[in-house]
Image (cartoon, rainbow, N blue to C red):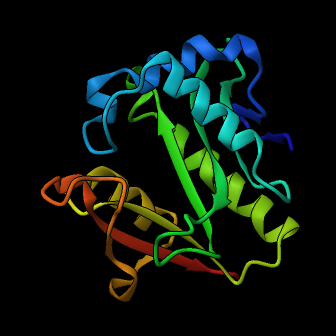
Amino acid sequence: MRIETPRLILRPPVAADRAALHAIWRDPLVMADLGPVKTAAESDATLARHAAYPNGLAFHAVVRRDDAAVIGFCGVKPGAADTPIAGEVEAGWIIARACWRHGYALEAMLAVLDWCWAHTYAPRVVAITARRNAKSRAMMQRLGMCQRPELDFRHPQFAPDDPLGDVVTYALHRP
């Protein structure tokens, strides 16, 4: 899968992307509402996990066209089996802090959603985040997603007292 927008190219990550993606995942401000910062090994495991998803579902490197910089990681993947979104197509994104507030995440995700509607039979796409993550929730709303309180849950990946485990779910139905 390769998706192009006016400013971005979304493509499967290559070995040369590893350092840029790891820098994003180890940035404490980027990860503040997403989860703990990742070690290099955890970053590699994330890349391997996404490369193994079936049916073209995967997160991809977000590459800025004008300078070929890897500025993020986004796409769609299968919802986690041990959560209420199991069996759903889940959207997600992460953008380097230096690239926040430039519209890159919105541009990338609108293109990903177009790809999803053209290449899957998913009746909807969901996205999850910590209840406290106002920036991601606002992004979900800009994408046209609506909160689905009946799908909110306590994420098993987080300790019971960790506020990041209080997860909200948003959904966008097929147009």
List the single residue furthest toward the left: 161
Image quarter of the N terminus = top right
Res 49 → quadrant: top right
- How far across and down, in percent of the image, does residue 174 sit? 69, 81
Asked whether, in this view, residue 161 is left or right of residue 167, the answer is: left
Asked if residue 68 shows in the view, the reply is: no
Residue at x 66% of width, y 57% of height:
77
- How far across and down, in percent of the image, does residue 146 sit? 42, 79
Res 15 → quadrant: top right
Q: Nearer the viewer, residue 78 or 62?
A: 78
Image quarter of the C terminus = bottom right
Residue at x 79% of width, y 59% of height:
115
Q: Nearer the viewer, residue 168 or 106?
A: 168
- How far across and down, in percent of the image, does residue 57 sit? 76, 55
- How far across and down, in percent of the image, does residue 84 sit? 47, 78
Residue at x 59% of width, y 31% of height:
45
Asked whether, in this view, residue 87 is left or right of residue 12, the answer is: left
Asked whether, in this view, residue 50 is left or right of residue 156, the answer is: right
In this rendering, the answer to whether 105 lies above or below 102 is below
Residue at x 17% of width, y 52% of height:
162
Q: Nearer the viewer, residue 72 or 65?
A: 72
In this rendering, the answer to whether 16 lies above or below 162 is above
Res 6 → quadrant: top right
Q: Nearer the viewer, residue 75 or 64?
A: 75
Asked if residue 12 shows in the view, the reply is: yes
List the single residue furthest toward the bottom: 150
Asked whether, in this view, residue 20 is left or right of residue 77, the answer is: left
